[in-house]
């Protein structure tokens, strides 16, 4: 296996799917001639032409709605939102239309399309360019939500998302774009199934269920917790937020007895709260202590480096929360 | 705090909103309405140099049959709503029929249409069966969408009907997307989208104007200007009087026509479709029309004088169509025969719908996601 | 005390606040000459004139943004969304702008405005006119969320919302509009504080925390549970969804040992999940059995009467869930 | 899977997006750009019969000082960004200065302004202190918004600056709301809102046009048309060439002017403000300008030929202002004195910002809600 960047993995996935199915087309701001603000769609206009790589004006509502229309007759649009924050600009088309179209038409029409773009904090973009939207997307039924953390998963899941007959929100993270990881070369095609979590680190004491850039933070936190505190975390990469692969998570919790869900969208009414609610619905008996969740602090994501760091639910907070879980309980550790 | 009684009362007041008593008089705002709305079917600026060929009498007769089918279905639906058989917001197209019919007959099989919550006339004109349409509005299992979409979401892909919509103007970019699909695939299909005068003030409309004009999409924007948005007259919210001027600023072909005359509508849509198919891009058509019934079932219509409605009876599509038929030598007897035939057809359709079973509860949970093998 | 309808209570609150503060004005579709589709703003144009009751075109994004601008200089706009579903049309202005404005300006500007309108199912309005949006609003920090269930609370909370220096989403429910309840006459002014829950029924076995129309359903369910199953529910009316008055809820759970959160917005990433997550963060020791939540089924709210009934998380489901909680546990009942 | 190393790499690649290498050539689309962008400062249709009175030499000198202050602050910010002192997306106004300055001096204290993420020039022209402005961009506690808003959210109510915005066109209805407040209160204040050419294709812009025109709000729409939206030239996305024609369809007063000439801008905004204050409603001004630097810090500008940028140097605001001063008899020495004075001022401002403490962590949790007694 070779090593590739996250961006390169996405670019390959798009190219391969455009070759694989002539119904696939790209639409969004700067995606064509410039190749995308973050260069994810680079060179694809040259290869596939102006009918399949469409540079739009700054009209998110219109081009999102157009994606629905085209998808309804079997095209497979991949819509880029330059920042996933702009979800809110096109929210009616996304949540009132795309998410509902299959249902409202009694199944007569389906809208296989992908909404993709980067999100997240860590680069001082401030309140309107740093939000994570996975919980928002997950709240509305009818749209799958995928948020891979590695180049391997990113490529395989983007290909799967494009082939899926449902609308899929494909959430990238600006901190992941230049990360590298192993992936098979282009000639070895693979898909990563939507809806399957992946254990990225095994451990015996606490299950950390997370995804996207928080996965990397959780893995780092796990190392520190292990080295400095003797706590052994199992890190489950959910990869897909809707549907949640609770089976894999519960399997892990069966072993550790502890669950901490971590994500970068707001904690309040977030995916973490959802996972906590579900474990008590479906498998409370697995828990040896209260399940916990961690998300973005309830503030509008400040620009200042020190403030942004404070608001993000990253390594430091993960470590602190796991240690809090430990302090609250005798016999916390299963291993060593 | 409420008692259980109150709760029940609320549950049973279907369409309570619209039926609640009104005290407002017809508009008495400081600004006055333009004269056109009370004196004529068309505002002053409506003259158009559109060439309107006479349609074959046979076709006019078919159109009359369709217009009456729509009208009687709408009346049956209003009656059913009053009985409580229909809930939610049901918007009838009484008075709007010609817009849909003229357009439907001007287009080809394979073309696409999207419309609003006020979409019954489009559905029928595009070939949807009245029985199944009524069943849909009533939430029965034989409805086109199994009772899930209801009145606001008429849909039948086999007829090119790609969906009504509950959100003002949301269906407009959908049609642009359909036109884009046709464009990308190099097909000859055109898309038409219907919307009301109020939709001009939803931003997405203008976003779509620009893209459609720039990309020369095979798209027809059809505005059914009935001079009201819910209970507010258009002159109170529009900065200009003639809506068809907005799309002109995008360099788009745009015209204002008599939307109550099927021949005029047919001519306009034919021309627009021809332009679209030959790569000349979108056309905007403002069909001046009038909604003879309330905005939705239960509307008490306190916001407009009754004389205004009565004045409009002279220009409404069925009247116009009947006049055309008489002028073509179709006699009263023949028309009456059609009337009876349609009347019977609608009775049957209502009976069909009323006998259609309720959907199974399990149906609630289906159609959220497509269940398919691909990609997984 | 006289009896009044929910609509009348709202209308009185608006009138009184417009009299009380000349900065208060109303803006929205059909709110002026017609008096509001649901007649909540009836007669106010006559009394206050066209400068304070503004009929807009169907331009939710623009008039929502205009409310922000006017509020930033001390006006107090009350914006009507004809259906709260249209939140999605104006989502950028609501969540990227209004919710964040105070924070992004470092506290220099504040935007005291109210977004009000009706929501909810039960009247066969279908997918795009029946959604409940409290969880959506609560997810974004910076905006208070209020959802009263009775005419008394509606009036007092609407007045408090208009006087609050923060943006407030004031969520009415179409099934509540024609309900009646006691309220003091106009000359006896009162406010109901934002952020305070109210115990609407005392009981010993299970705490049901809910709000808006679900409160009425919960009260009915409690009666049935008591009469037919001998289960005694305490029903806490949250009234405010952001901030949550967890103190009052935990106090109740301290007594009952059981918590069921109920709301009409989607269960997934909803306020119910949030309450479950919080009880395990803040007061897990109070619970004698897993906390539960109940929300709208994950479907796009169908029109058909039978399907809509099935999707709604009302009386029947509340009863079933409480009985499920009971079945799962010996010694469930505290009382009788 | 990533190693911890990769993570660190990603963390440190500030502005990585824009700095990633590019392979695309300058635009080679099938459609060609209009000649104006490479041959002249103004597109063809730009002639305007606006009466442009000469401004006092004293004022022009002040404007020059302001333009240079903005320019040097922007350059200092770009340098700081390159050093990693500034993150996120920082958009400078190099080349845009005259639009802000001409407008600011044409309006009165008490008037309101909203702008975009590209708002440094408006901030300074409206009187904000460069030291505190830089501190804000750097996220320091002395920033106007204590480092919370940063470059995209310039704000200072005491100067009438009511906020920049990260969402294209979102600030436009805010200004309409400010104008509405003035209208309701019967005040003489006007509001001006700045936006780019790309903002014309956000629906909310058109929604606001209609309301502002209908209600005759005291509002000035000011479009800084720099012919690009991020990396895409306007001719590739706009259905028409002359943007100022869009608002005309709303019956709005609208003009296209040279946005690089402070006297022209001043005259246009003065006229618009006068109209607004006397109840004649909104005006749209399209100021033709050019962004000499990248869209944002780190932009490699592969999407436009270097010659285009060079050609524009002849028309850019500082050049134009210097020419004006020379023509008025202000000699090189006097200009150099100003240059040195401003240079020093900006050095001091940078030093002030760099010495400004970081905000306290506790600050993170403040300003989410207003803490007040009222209403509770
Ligand atoms: C975005 C949005 N805002 C408001 C509504 C509520 N609403 C439904 S129909 C309507 C009036 C639409 O008027 P018009 O476009 O003229 O169409 P008509 O009903 O007259 O056919 C309104 C405001 C809606 N459905 N969607
Ligand atoms: C709604 C929205 N879409 C996209 C963006 C990303 N974006 C930021 S600036 C910009 C270009 C804006 O171009 P223009 O309006 O011409 O202003 P300029 O930057 O040229 O001054 C874009 C697309 C955004 N901030 N908001
Ligand atoms: Mg209308
Ligand atoms: Mg620009």
Image (cartoon, coloured by chain):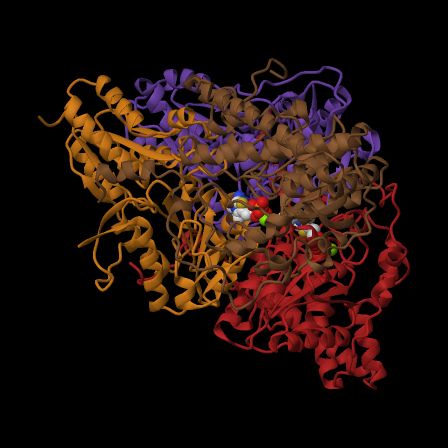
Chain colours: A orange, B red, C purple, D brown
In the image as oriented, which residue stretches furthest toward the left?
Answer: A336
Quadrant in which ligand 3 is drawn? bottom right
The quarter in which the N terminus of chain A is drawn is: bottom left
Q: Which residue is more in the foreground, B337 or B24?
A: B24
At 63% from the left and 64% from the top, the residue drawn is B213
Q: Position of residue D286 (x, y in %)?
A: 70, 48
Question: Which image quadrant for residue C47?
Answer: top right
Q: Position of residue A4 (x, y in %)?
A: 25, 51
* Left or right: D369 in relation to C258: right
Question: Which image quadrant for residue B51?
Answer: bottom right
Q: Position of residue B55 (x, y in %)?
A: 75, 83
Examine the rendered structure and indicate whether residue C335 appears above or below residue C171. Answer: above
Q: Is residue D189 visible?
A: yes
Q: How many marks are shown on the rendered structure? A: 0
Q: Position of residue C40 (x, y in %)?
A: 71, 34
Q: Which residue is more in the foreground, A192 or D203?
A: D203
* Left or right: C208 in relation to D343: left
Question: Which image quadrant for residue D102?
Answer: top right
């Amino acid at each position: 296996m070779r090593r590739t960047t996250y961006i390169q993995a996405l670019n390959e996935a798009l190219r391969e799917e455009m070759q694989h199915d002539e119904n696939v087309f790209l639409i969004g701001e700067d995606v064509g001639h410039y190749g995308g603000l973050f260069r994810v769609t680079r060179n694809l206009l040259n290869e596939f032409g102006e009918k399949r790589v469409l540079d739009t004006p700054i009209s998110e509502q219109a081009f999102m709605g157009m994606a629905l229309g085209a998808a309804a007759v079997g095209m497979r649009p991949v819509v880029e939102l330059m920042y996933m924050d702009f979800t809110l600009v096109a929210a009616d088309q996304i949540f009132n239309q795309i998410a509902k179209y299959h249902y409202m038409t009694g199944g007569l029409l389906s809208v296989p399309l992908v909404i993709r773009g980067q999100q997240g904090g860590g680069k001082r973009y401030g309140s309107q360019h740093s939000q994570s939207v996975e919980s928002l997307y997950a709240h509305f039924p009818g749209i799958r939500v995928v948020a891979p953390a590695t180049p391997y998963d990113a490529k395989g899941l983007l290909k799967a998302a494009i082939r899926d007959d449902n609308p899929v929100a494909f959430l990238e993270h600006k901190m992941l774009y230049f990360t590298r990881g192993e992936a098979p070369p282009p000639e070895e095609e693979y898909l990563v199934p939507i809806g399957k979590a992946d254990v990225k680190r095994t451990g015996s004491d606490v299950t950390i269920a997370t995804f996207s850039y928080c996965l990397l933070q959780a893995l780092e936190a796990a190392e520190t917790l292990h080295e400095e505190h003797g706590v052994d975390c199992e890190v489950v990469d959910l990869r897909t937020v809707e549907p949640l692969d609770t089976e894999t998570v519960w399997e892990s919790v069966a072993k550790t007895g502890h669950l901490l869900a971590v994500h970068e969208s707001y904690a309040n009414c977030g995916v973490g709260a959802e996972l906590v609610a579900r474990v008590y619905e479906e498998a409370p008996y697995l828990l040896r202590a209260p399940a916990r969740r961690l998300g973005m602090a309830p503030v509008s994501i400040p620009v200042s480096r020190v403030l942004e760091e404070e608001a993000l639910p990253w390594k430091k907070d993960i470590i602190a929360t796991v240690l809090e879980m430990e302090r609250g309980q005798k016999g916390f550790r299963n291993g060593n | 705090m409420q008692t259980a009684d109150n709760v029940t009362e609320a549950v049973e007041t279907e369409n309570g909103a619209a039926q609640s008593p009104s005290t407002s008089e017809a508009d008495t705002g400081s600004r006055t309405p333009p004269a056109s709305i009370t004196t004529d079917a068309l505002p002053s600026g409506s003259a158009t140099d559109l060439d309107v060929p006479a349609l074959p009498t046979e076709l006019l007769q078919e159109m009359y049959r369709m217009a009456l089918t729509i009208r009687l279905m709408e009346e049956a639906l209003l009656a059913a709503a009053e009985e409580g058989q229909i809930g939610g917001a049901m918007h009838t197209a009484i008075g709007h029929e010609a817009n849909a019919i003229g357009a439907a007959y001007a287009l080809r099989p394979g073309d696409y249409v999207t419309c609003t919550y006020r979409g019954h006339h489009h559905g029928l004109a595009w070939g949807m069966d009245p029985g199944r349409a009524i069943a849909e509005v009533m939430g029965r299992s034989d409805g086109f969408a199994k009772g899930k979409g209801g009145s606001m979401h008429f849909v039948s892909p086999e007829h090119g009907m790609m969906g009504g919509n509950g959100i003002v103007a949301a269906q407009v970019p959908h049609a642009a997307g359909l036109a884009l699909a046709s464009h990308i695939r190099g097909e000859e299909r055109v898309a038409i989208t219907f919307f009301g005068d109020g939709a001009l003030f939803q931003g997405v409309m203008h976003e779509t104007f620009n893209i459609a004009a720039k990309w020369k999409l095979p798209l027809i924007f059809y505005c059914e200007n009935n001079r009201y948005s819910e209970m507010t007259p258009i002159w109170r919210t529009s900065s200009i009087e003639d809506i068809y001027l907005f799309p002109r600023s995008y360099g788009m072909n745009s015209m204002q026509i008599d939307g109550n005359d099927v021949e005029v509508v047919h001519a306009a849509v034919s021309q627009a479709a021809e332009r679209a198919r030959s790569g000349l891009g979108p056309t905007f058509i403002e069909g001046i029309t009038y909604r003879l019934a309330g905005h939705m079932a239960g509307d008490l219509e306190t916001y407009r004088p009754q004389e205004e409605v009565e004045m409009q009876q002279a220009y409404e599509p069925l009247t116009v169509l009947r006049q055309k038929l008489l002028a073509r030598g179709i006699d009263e007897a023949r028309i009456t025969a059609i009337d009876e035939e349609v009347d019977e057809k609608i009775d049957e359709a209502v009976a069909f719908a009323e006998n259609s079973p309720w959907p199974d509860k399990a149906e609630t949970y289906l159609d959220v996601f497509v269940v398919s093998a691909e990609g997984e």
